[in-house]
Amino acid sequence: EIRYCDWSSDVCSSDLTVATGATGAAGSVPLDTVTAYADTTPTITAGSPIIFSDNTELNGTALSHTANTGDIVFNEPGVYFAAFSGTAVPPTGTAFPSTNSIYMTLNGTRLEGATAQHIFHISTENAPESVSRIITVTAAGSRLEVVTEGDIVFNYATLSVFKIADLPANT
């Protein structure tokens, strides 16, 4: 029974009918996740991927990451969600103002809608940068990277990816 209450008049009703969906099959939902991270990166040159020194939350078989590399490997097709965050810091010797952009690539192709940018004005400035996107992967072995368009250092860089669905039948 679902009761609806109008708190402004203290009136409750149990005459409300709510449609419910079918009960799903018993069992568990497969969990395919990876989080790659680096507490501090070396200076990343423009056009290069961010290198993640370690992994955590590596579950299932759909995703993989090798420590000290910049790519997440999709081991099976599907629909995934990816989110990157990190604190960008200009490296020593940077001329100001200096622009840094980051973006996601799939197999070397830039993914539209997954770009962030910051313009640095002083050497002590740091800036959080983050991007996220739903990604449809059609082939096993596809690779995701976060690439920078400026020479930059990242503190606390994290890339988390999880599978949200198998590919739809029409893909």
Image (cartoon, rainbow, N blue to C red):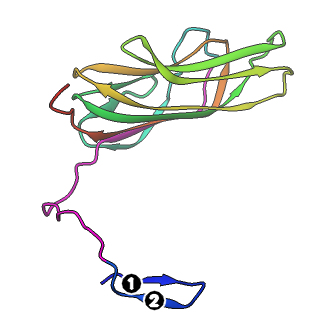
Residue 42 rendering spot, x and y as whole percentages = 62, 20
Q: Is residue 103 above or below residue 60?
A: above
Asked whether the residues under the numbered discs 2 and 1 touch, taking CB atoms below 8 Å apart as contact, a structural biologist would say yes
Q: Which mark is residue 129?
A: none
Q: Which residue is mark 1?
A: 3
In the image: residue 167, left or right of residue 136:
left
What stretch of residues is rendered in magenta? Answer: 17-42
Q: Residue at x 15, y 31 (%)?
A: 169
Amino acid type at mark 1: Arg
Amino acid type at mark 2: Cys
Based on the picture, tell me whether residue 117 belongs to the magenta stretch: no
Q: Is residue 38 visible?
A: no
Residue 77 rendering spot, x and y as whole percentages = 22, 28
- Quarter of the image with the N terminus in it: bottom left
Q: Nearer the viewer, residue 168 or 13?
A: 13
In the image: residue 7, left or right of residue 72:
right
Residue 119 rendering spot, x and y as whole percentages = 76, 20
Q: Nearer the viewer, residue 40 or 60?
A: 60
Q: Residue at x 85, y 20 (%)?
A: 121
Q: Residues within 10 Å of mark 1 (few under 14, many from 20)?
A: few
- Quarter of the image with the C terminus in it: top left
Residue 135 rendering spot, x and y as whole percentages = 37, 28
Q: Residue at x 25, y 35 (%)?
A: 62
Q: Which mark is residue 12?
A: 2
Q: Residues within 10 Å of mark 2 (few under 14, many from 20)?
A: few
Q: In the picture, residue 90 is in which quadrant?
A: top right
Q: What is the secondary structure assignment of the residue under circle 2?
A: strand
Q: Is residue 46 visible?
A: yes
Q: Main secondary structure of the magenta part?
A: loop
